[in-house]
Every structure is written in structure tokens, then in C-alpha cells.
Image (cartoon, rainbow, N blue to C red):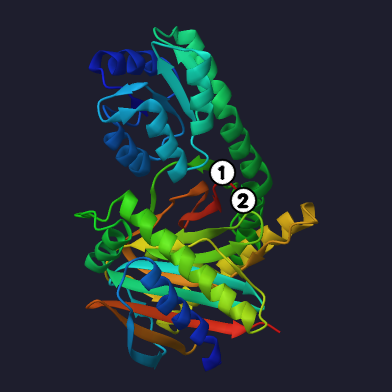
Amino acid sequence: MIVDDSRVSRLMLANNLAKTNFEVVAMAKDAAEALRLYEAENPDLVTMDMNLPDSDGIECSRKICAMDPGAKIVMISAMKDANLIEQGRAAGISAFLQKPVSPNDLLDTLMLLCQEKISRIAFLRESYAKPFAASLKQGLLDLVHLHVEPKTEYYEKKYLEVNGIAIIIGLTGSPNGRAIVYMSDDTMENFAKRMLGGELEDEDDAQEAVEEAANIFIGHGVSAINGIFKNKEMRITPPGTFYGSGVKMTTQKLVTFKITAMTEIGEIGINVGFAEGD
Amino acid sequence: MDAKLVNPFIEAFMAVMPMLGFQAPTRKDMSVKNKNAVSKGVVVMVGFTKQLRGNVVYNITDETARFIASTMMMGMPVPEFDAMAQSAISELSNMLSANAATNLTQMGLDVDISTPNLTIGEGFSVKISDSKYLVIAMDLQGHNVEIAISVDRNY
């Protein structure tokens, strides 16, 4: 997010960033707008001008950090002196650059500040998301004789939209979070038929079969994690089953991963999320 | 399900809401259900583990969700249930769960809480128990907050 009262400065920064892998998700012209957009967009990084019409960059940064102690703010101002840096650090600003900023300096600074988040995502993916991909693969083979290699990707959307069934299982311990096993109606029916070996007698059979399978996928994933990290005992809550169309599950304040198995009976997914800042 | 396990959740609601600027809520109704709950618009589910296992679900309309978020943000208008309002509701459910957990600890039960699950949409069904569960209807300044509870001691 770019915070700057000058339209020209905002456009110059946005132009520089357009050539990189960073995406500008919001631009604010004053402190009030910055606070509102920060909350709405939850950006990974903020560039902050010192002069704002309704406040100043230090005060605005202080408020953002009060809202989100993990906020990463770079001050970009015409002036840069020891006094400003001292006050800025106390307000939670991570880095200081002087206008006009060279694109290389800007990129280096932003990359450095993102390193921590990138390495946390990589760590969560390898240590905490991949075990669920492995348990999904094994579970599909054991329960419904489907041989697939699930894909794991970082999920950045604000919602997971489900049309069909979603089974939510809470994860407690460190990190805490939740896992959602989901699939469409048709996939659920075919899944249950394969799992139960024939036609379904009761309309609840399909849901119950998928619930049972979800418990196995997530339970085995958690067992694998607990097997690696002996000191962190992760536990699972009983499942909650959501069923309907256009069901929007938020991913707010979570680092989430989408694990997808494309099978001959349709897509079977797990969205696993871990609380931010654990 | 042991009825005594419900009180910590009701007490948490009674204690936390006034701290956030609401008038004291009142309990309207308590019933035992075995059919799935149906979403009124916004559903928050929180799971519990360790010595207590189960789920608690807060089911409210979009309008009630906006009223609660607005009150929590000192009366700021909330015309849409946007990210900021969603964050307020998630934060509220965190506070309610943490307060309930403290009450449970006082009963000698050690519990751990999952992150809240905020789900939006009207009319989808929610199942938190294979058998019966309790539903408590709370009145919050004319708004209805339905709390569905399915928890059991874990021996």
C-alpha cells in the first residue's frame, strides 16, 4: 500500500513497483484513508510519506502498528535525519528512504522486509501444509482407490467459496488454525459410493462418508506433524459440516494453503490455514 | 451433553458484551435440537480441544453482524459487512471463547481453542453434532444472537 498526499509521488512509486513482483493493492492520500485501507486490504508492506494533510507519517504509522503489530512500514520522505529516524523507529517504522528513491533501493528494502514473511510461508508450506497433501494422497488411495498427486499452493484470496460440502476441523496447539475439506455435490456422491462400495441407502450417508474421510485426512496429517515436532502437540477439534451453495469462508488473519487433488470423480480440496504471527 | 458445560459460554457472552459497549444481553430461550442449524447470514464457529471437545457456533443475520461491528467500533457506520466488520466479529468471537475458556478453567477443565471460522452466506446448513445439541437465543438490544453448543468432556 502506498500512502502519499501527492498524486505524482503515488504514481511514481506505483510505476516503479509495476516492474517488480510487488503488487500495489491500495493507495491512500491521507491518514484516515490509510487506516481504512490497511484494515480492508491487509497489505504486506506500506510506503509512508511524512507529510499528510490530516496527520503525519509517524502518527499514521503508530496507528497502523497499534492495529497490526506485525505491520511493515517504509518511510519515504524528502527529509531524513537522526531525529526523524528515532521517532519513526519508536512508532514502529522498519526502514527509511529519501525522495527521490531509486528503484533499486526501493526494491532491495522491500525485499528485505518481506524476507521474514516469505520464509514463514515457505516454512509453513513445507512443515505444516505438505503433511496434509501427503495424508490426502494416502487417504484417497486407501478409502476410494484413487491415485492422484495433490498440488499444494499458497492461497492469497480472502475467501474460500464452497458449493457443496465443507468440513471444518479446528487445529489447536502451535500454530493453531483450521483445515477445511471440501468438494461439490456430485463429487461427494461419487466419493461416498466408492467409499461404501455401492449405492447409497440414506441421503445422510454421503455426508457422513465425507465427514469420516475428512477426519482421516486431517487426523493423519496432524499425526505426521506431531511425529516431526515432538514438543508441539497439535490437536484437532470435532468436525463441523457446512453444506450449501455460495458459502464464503474467510481466510482473514490466516496464512492459508490450497491443496488440490484433481480426480476422475472431481476436485477434492483441503484449505489449511494457520494463525498469523504465531 | 452435560448442561453444566453450557453455563461458561452463556456467562462469557453476558460478561463480554457490556465491556464492548452493549447493554446487558438477556437470555430468551434455550432448546435442544437435533436437526442441522441454518445460517442466518453470518456464522462463526470455534472449536475446543483438550479436556473439553466440541464446537460453539454463533449464528446471526448480516444486519446483526453490522450492528455488533458498528457498536464495537464506537458507533462508526457499517453499511456493508466488509473486511473491517468481519475482523471485528472474529475478534469478538476470540474474546468470547477466551472468556469461556477462563470460566472452564475455574471448573477444573483445561481447554485449547481453535481460530474462529467466519463463514458468510444465507441458508447453508451447519452440523456440529451427530446427536443432540443446545441452542441458546440471546437478545442483544433487540438483535437475536443464536449460540449453538455441542461440547463434551474428554476423558
User: Is A74 or A179 nearer to us in this picture?
Assistant: A74
Q: Which chain does tag 1 point to?
A: A
Residue A124 left/right relative to B80: right
Q: Earlier in the sequence, mark 2 or mark 1?
A: 2
Task: Look at 39% across and 7% down and name the residue there.
Answer: A100
Tell me which chain the residue with mark 2 is part of.
Answer: A
Q: Quadrant of residue A23?
A: top left
Taking the image as shown, residue B29 lies to the left or right of residue A83, namely: left
Marks 2 and 1 close (CB-CB < 8 Å): yes
From the top left corner, tell me how far across and down residue B65 is, in percent: 29, 65
Residue drawn at x 41%, y 66% is A165
Q: Label 1 is placed on what type of residue?
A: Thr
Along the line of sight, which residue is nearer the eye, B15 or B154? B15
Which residue is outermost to the right? A230
Residue marked by disc 2:
A133
Q: Secondary structure at mark 2?
A: helix
Tag 1 residue: A152
